[in-house]
Amino acid sequence: MADWEQERHCPCAREAQAESSSRRSLLAASLVLVAAPLVPAGTAAADNPRRLKPQAGDGLAYMTGEKQGKQITPADLKVGAPPVLAYPLDMASQTVRDGARTNLLALVRLRPDDLPAALKADAADGVVAFSAICTHYGCPITEIHPSGGALVCNCHGSTFDVRKNGEVVAGPATRRLTHLPLKQSEGALLVAGNFSGPLGPPQQ
Ligand code: FES
């Protein structure tokens, strides 16, 4: 039985998780606000590089923290560490594409043996970029499971196995996380293509 399955069957774990979850939900709620910066109403995506979807050749920039807006390198990612939240970065203008929530990414590093076949070509030095928008109700995904192998949404506990290409292993979400292909160039992480599937919750 996987770790997240054992936790779901242990009452004491559930109580501890509920308390922890409540604290993390506050963090997630605050990140929702940070993750949705204001862009002038009526500004078309094509006219505003901040709202453009990730473009091939974009770098990746920290979403928050002391390094907010700074470019991320593979060395910044550790196996089993919490995901690094990032936005695409237009390298020519150094514009962070933070004007669309769906551009938010959760970067994780996997051991070579843990990389599923579906992600091998789209990872850069073991780093994989998943959409950080939960496929349940769209909360930002900010946590790694203690096993180091799954991303966890703080809002309602949906858990996505990164070693199975973002597959849902605990609901309420029902759709896997999509990922963004990456490549490495001169020590930097760069976007190498389009998202592999639909973003966020299924349309109602
Ligand atoms: S929004 Fe992520 S589990 Fe509900």
Image (spheres, rainbow, N blue to C red):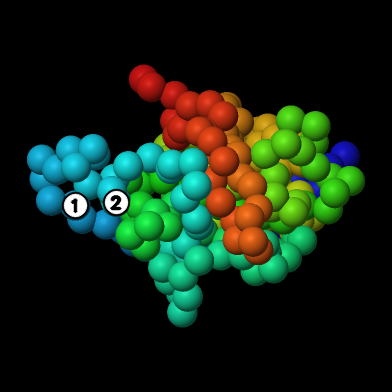
Q: Is mark 2 on a helix, strand or loop?
A: loop
Splitting the image into 4 quarters, where does residue 160 fall? top right
Foreground mark, 1 or 2? 2
Return the residue nearer the eye: 182 or 36: 182
Q: Residue 107 at x, y = what percent?
A: 60, 54
Mark closest to the chain's N terminus, 1 or 2: 1
Q: Does the residue labelled 2 lie within 8 Å of ligand 1?
A: no
Residue in view at x 70 percent, y 45 percent: 123
Marks 1 and 2, how far apart at CA: 8 Å
Q: What element carries label 1?
A: loop
Residue in view at x 48 percent, y 27 percent: 198
- Identify the amino acid type marked 1: Val
Q: Name the residue under label 1.
A: 39
Q: Mark 2 points at which residue?
A: 50
Q: Is residue 170 among the parts visible in the rendering?
A: no
Q: In this view, does 198 lie to the left or right of 157?
A: left
- Identify the amino acid type marked 2: Arg
In the rendered view of the protein, which quadrant contains the N terminus? Answer: top right
Q: Residue 3 at x, y = what percent?
A: 81, 48
Q: Does 49 appear above or below 83?
A: above
Q: Is residue 74 among the parts visible in the rendering?
A: yes
Q: Does the residue labelled 1 lie within 8 Å of ligand 1?
A: no
Look at the numbered discs 1 and 2 and tell me whether their residues touch, using CB distance below 8 Å: yes
Estimate how packed mark 2 is, as few (under 14), some (14 to 19) or many (20 or more) residues with alpha carbons within 10 Å.
many
Please identify the residue farthest to the bottom as the structure is shown: 66
Q: In this view, does 70 lie to the left or right of 109?
A: left
Q: Residue 74 at x, y = what percent?
A: 67, 62
Residue in view at x 75 percent, y 46 percent: 4
Splitting the image into 4 quarters, where does residue 33 fall? bottom left
In this figure, what is the number of numbered marks? 2
Estimate how packed mark 1 is, as few (under 14), some (14 to 19) or many (20 or more) residues with alpha carbons within 10 Å.
some
